[in-house]
Image (cartoon, helix red, strand yellow):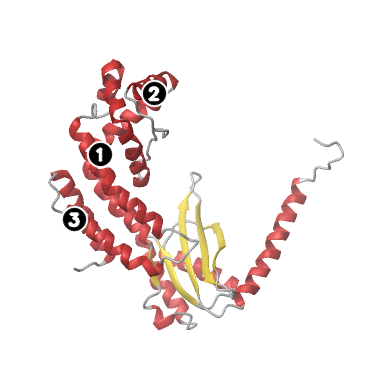
Amino acid sequence: MQRKFYVISRTTVTKDIIGIFNEEKKKLKGHMKELSGRVCITTDMWTLIQNLGYMVLTAHFVDKDWKLQKKIINFRVLPHPHKGEAIAKAVENCLLEWGIEKVMTITLDNAKNNDSCITELKKRLNKRNGLLLGGEFFHIRYFAHVINLVVRDGVNEVKRTIKRLRQSVKYVRSGPSRIQPFKKCASDENLTTKRALCLDVKIRWNLTYLMIDTAMEFEKAFDRLEEHDPNYKIECDVKGEGLLGDSDWRKLKALQTFLEEFYKLTKRVSSSKYVTSNTYFDELTQAKDLLIDNLTNDDVDFCEMAMKMDAKFDKYCNFDL
């Protein structure tokens, strides 16, 4: 380090950061007061391992230059319990703090406490005439979260096959002594892919899709590993549901194609860089059509999966064809 460089104290750094934050907040509040249109709000909540609940509130609006803006206006601890009334009060206090009077919509996930939050928040904002049409279209469901709930339910119908794949991937990825022989198996099968196996997280279906998507390129390598590594079969039998068979690979191939559409759909409707409301209905009907097409699938497991997903989809989207 340059000897002439003076290291400032933690107290000074903290003071400077807070000063910059307050100055930027003042500027943003000024810009938002000049808005001629309304502001759309999104919010999310989660609990850290310290059992502290946090809430983030994000404002989405079109500025005077007709550019879509996204600004986090609140990030704070929200004490338990996270009841709807408490969430509504926290959101209202934040809007008052920022001087936001004209709200268009609010988007939340599908937690039960958010229903009572919406009821309470509409009541509070309507007292100040802050909503259009009395808030009839105030609550917008988070479509990507709906997809997440729908697909998670469906994937659970083929959980044994997925568990076999998960254990196989886990076995290969457990250390260099297993990765290198697997690479040799892939090389012997003339597999030239540059992708690497990835392990999913059980509650994240999109990661399960990526695990399936990459594993499909190594099907022949897994078959060869079974022939050359006796420990592979032993460990999969003990810790999992056994080895992957031909029927499992057929299911995984079909599941890969099926989930790919929902994966792409989720990415399209999850952007904050461009408006997605104009494509929402088209995406909604595409998801519905995909489910209907699989209701008559020849594979019984897939048919049951599609039926369960379709019922969940209708529950959240009130779809009536």
Residue under circle 1?
252
Q: Quadrant location of residue 64?
A: bottom right
User: Is the residue 259 above or below the residue 160 in the image?
Assistant: below
Task: Report the residue at 51% width, 77% height from top.
Answer: 38
Question: Which of the two labelled residues, at mark 2 and mark 3, occupies the earlier sequence position?
Answer: 2
User: Is the residue 181 above or below the residue 136 in the image?
Assistant: above
How far is disc 1 from disc 2 in space, using C-alphas?
A: 21 Å
Q: Position of residue 202 (x, y in %)?
A: 34, 41
Q: Quadrant of the N terminus?
A: top right
Residue under circle 3?
293
Question: Which of the two labelled residues, at mark 1 and mark 2, occupies the earlier sequence position?
Answer: 2
Q: Could you classify mark 1 by the number of other residues whose Cα lies within 10 Å: few (under 14), some (14-19), or many (20 or more)?
A: many
Residue under circle 2?
183
Secondary structure type for disc 2: helix
Task: Report the residue at 42% width, 77% height from top.
Answer: 123
Q: Quadrant of the C terminus?
A: bottom left
Q: Is residue 307 visible?
A: no
How far is disc 2 from disc 3 in space, using C-alphas?
A: 38 Å
